[in-house]
Amino acid sequence: MKKAPLVPVALAMIAGIVVARHIDIATTVWLWSLAGCATATGITLLISKRLHAVSPMLTVLLCGLVGGLLSTIKLQRDWTHDCPEKTFLEVRLSETPVPREKSWRAKAAVLSGGDITLFLRKDSTAATLRYGDRLLLHGYPDLERRIIYITSDHYLVTSRDSTSLRARCEALRLKLLRRMQAGPLKQREAGVAEALTLGWRGDIAPGTQASFRDAGIAHLLAVSGLHVGLLATIVGGMLVWVDKERRGRIIRGCVQLAAIWAFTLLTGLAPSTVRAALMFSLFIVAHISGRHTPALNLLATTAIITLTLNPLLVFNVGWQLSYCAVAGISLARPVIMAFNNRLWQLTAVSTFATLATLPVVATTFHRLPVYFLIANITIVPLAGVLLFLSLVYMALPCDATAWPLFWLTRFCEWLTAWVASLPGSVVEV
């Protein structure tokens, strides 16, 4: 409570959200409980006139009740609440559809509340869909998995978004993607570069994706906190010469913040990337101000913000993986900082992040990569170089920039395939 006072607050919110999800409690019950707890807190403050006199247990209970109330309200507005077997849904695409082997996949926000994943049959209509498009669907959604398989004659495009900031960033992202696809780099290697720089995973070869998954480093192909941290490190390293006084720290921090959020916008504002960008922004602001803030406190701050906006994110696998990874890194910070070499520190960061996410991976995907430590030691140190070369190729796709990226990607793919092919590389849980 003293070193990271917001951690119990975040945990209490999560507990309240989980209780509200699994136990049907009326909104009025949550409101009366919250009012009673708030009254007790107010009376305590009036009597003692000191903030620290409020019982920590009372504070935790208050935050838990807030989480339960927010979750109950959100669940009542969710589209799966009393949804018939066959229904009409009006949705807004949260991302540009990504091609798969037999379909296009896209996440969408249901206008009545909640989200859904669309699997659209491959045809000319689905290929024209973009972020921000509003669709009217008619079909049989899977309520438990929150997905729907649908053909072009069962949805209608009602409007398109081309003016918002997110839509403009998405248009720029697709323009850069087409530029990379037209470059001299072969499709297999270009798919990895597109995933690292633009968060586009539609061109990654299935074999490459399977090898990275079985080796325990699938997070390298999905833009996440690791990539945001690598970018912040690269930019900070290029400006290390100005970080000698307060003015230099401000300049360096502002450039890092601009690079982080530009990268987040270009990669499609994925939830994991937004969370990572928010947390690294808090770190950078703390560094500029010269204050030491515990990493777990910053992590709890981002958790409280995101859960207040959408409490059901607790049940999102991406949210769970992100926060488990950062919590593991934060708790293992003394061990990580014991390494004097930057490459070894990066390897340790990835290793502890993988260890912290293993329980979520095992319970969700029912498989555990056995040799993830070998992959983290051998491949992760190259991730920063690979990201830098991919950014250079994105800016200037030509033979000179494609050649080093091609051979480094080939080497990483070969090494990953070797680790994945070792006996017993994956344990089915």
Image: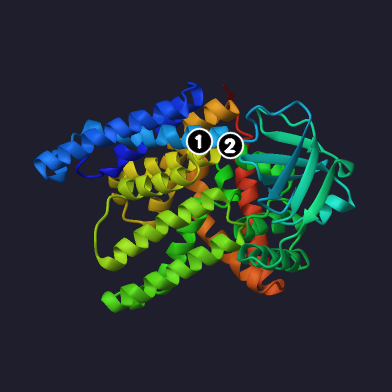
Label 1 Cα crowd, 10 Å radius (few <14 / some 14-19 / many 20+): some
Residue at left 55%, top 63%?
A: 263
In this view, 367 is above or below 228:
above
Q: Quadrant of residue 353?
A: top left
Residue at left 30%, top 68%?
A: 288
Q: Quadrant of residue 196?
A: bottom right
Disc ID at residue 77 = 2
The kind of secondary structure element at disc 2 is loop
In this view, 385 is above or below 2:
below
Residue 133: image location, x then y, percent: 74, 55
Residue ID for mark 1: 73
Residue 369 appears in the figure: no
Q: Is residue 250 left or right of residue 135?
A: left
Q: Which amino acid type is marked by label 2?
A: Arg
Name the colour scheme.
rainbow
Residue at left 83%, top 54%?
A: 127
Label 2 Cα crowd, 10 Å radius (few <14 / some 14-19 / many 20+): some
Q: Is residue 250 left or right of residue 191?
A: left
Q: Which amino acid type is marked by label 1?
A: Ile
Residue 134 appears in the figure: yes
Q: Is residue 347 left or right of residue 200?
A: left
Tag count: 2
Residue 297: image location, x then y, percent: 31, 47
- Do the CB atoms of the residues marked 1 and 2 lie less than 8 Å apart? yes
Position of the N terminus by quadrant: top left
User: Farthest residue toward the left?
Assistant: 48
